[in-house]
Image (cartoon, rainbow, N blue to C red):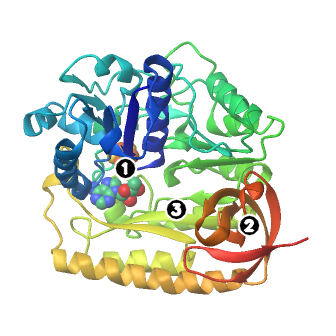
Amino acid sequence: MPKLFIETLGCAMNSRDSEHMIAQLREKEGYTTTEDFKEADLILINTCSVRERPVHKLFSELGGFNKKKKKSAKIGVCGCTASHLGDEIIKRAPYVNFVLGARNVSKISEVLHKDKAVEIDINYDESEFAFDDFRTSPYKAFINISIGCDKACTFCIVPKTRGDEISIPADLIINEAQKAVDSGAKEVFLLGQNVNNYGRRFSGDTEKVNFTELLNRLSKIEKLERIRFTSPHPFHMDDEFIEEFARNPKICKSMHMPLQSGSSKVLKDMKRGYTKEWFINRVEKLRAECPTVSISTDIIVAFPGESDADFAETIDVMKQVRFDQIFSFKYSPRPETEAEHFPEVDSEIASQRLSYLQTLNNEILDELHLESMDKTYRVYFEELIRDGYVSGRSDNNIVIKVKGSEELLGTFQEVKVNAIGRTILTGEILA
Ligand code: 5AD
Ligand code: SF4
């Protein structure tokens, strides 16, 4: 059987796209996967282009693969960088056999047999494509609910790599969830660039269902215990959505709310569609409806034009909200985005802001984690980790490990926290 090595960068959607490609290659071409690229017959890199650095790294990585791979092995570049660089990848690395864009993953077995194929059409519609089935985790099923993104955030390359937003028909999503549950998963993780915009546009003549209704229908699946999703957009967080989130016991009480900036002026320049006040108002509504909710966010520092006063607004939001998790990034200009040619903030200042923000975040996290000490959480165990531990997540997304082995995987346990760490807490299972 031919062997496939696949490296996946970027977001959860990319991870799901990789699962889709593995499934297609397994069913149609008889591939099995390997962790060692030197024995692979096909090497795929599923790339991310959201920031500049991983794009630079791609070519040195490709060179490394090419030097040490089996002579006959093919190399394919997939994902968002494939979409945005297209045939330039083959020009710069002529040994690459094919380039497959983020919105074309269903064509993987087709391009495999066409040397130097470049399939990167961002208008290609695979929203109703029936992918074969492959899941990295038997306990948790990632399910795409839409493709593409309709927003026009001025910093973001994604609409150029994944195209316009199209929702996947609700019955396909429900079937996929049901299938995953039938084979043992107790959690589904819904994926889209903008999940709470679900239902605005379908490609075929399909029943129009909005996100709240989709959540409602999914939660009727018996034996499905947990529903998570990412990412919702703060602009679309209306009361109906927040109320369904709070009311529905199967929806995990953890919300990702990408703030990007706390300054209303910067938010306007980013074309985010909301203000600092709206964001804080939504956090307050969410916490009022759902006091146990954990809130995570993404923040970009040093967006062009961000002044000290603007940055102070971001810090103010951090202090008011006290996020449970922050993914923070220095602004990175991306091709074909509106902000590409905006004058940049000095890079020394950008680094200082990022480090200030991250230090403050660590202080907040240490305080929040202390509040978890001696508390009991219902944990769903998913992963064996080092030194005889098994880890899982609470409903509100706290990562907790306990001493144990395989038999805990896929089970729910009441766990009392007895030690605090920055990214993972330790606990013991209550008898
Ligand atoms: N520069 C820095 N960070 C970015 N992100 C998206 N585009 C850029 C960019 N040009 C961040 C945003 C987004 C996350 C996935 O990546 O915070 O929410
Ligand atoms: Fe995901 Fe965006 Fe990176 Fe594409 S560019 S892989 S959508 S994070």
| Residue that mark 3 sits on | 278
Which mark identifies residue 202?
none
Q: Residue at x 56, y 42 (%)?
A: 136
Q: Give residue 212's position: percent from left, percent from top.
A: 68, 40
Judge depth for marks 3 and 1 and give the one in front.
Answer: 1
Distance from Cα at disc 2 to Cα at disc 3 = 44 Å
Q: Give residue 254's position: percent from left, percent from top.
A: 64, 60
Q: Amino acid at mark 1?
A: Leu
Distance from Cα at disc 3 to Cα at disc 1 = 33 Å
* 54, above or below 85, in the image: below
Q: Is mark 1 within 8 Å of ligand 2?
A: yes
Q: Amino acid at mark 2?
A: Gly
| Residue that mark 1 sits on | 9
| Residue that mark 2 sits on | 404
Q: Earlier in the sequence, mark 2 or mark 3?
A: 3
**Label 2 close to label 3 by CB (< 8 Å):** no
Q: Give residue 68's position: percent from left, percent from top.
A: 21, 46
- The quadrant of the rendering that contains the N terminus is top left
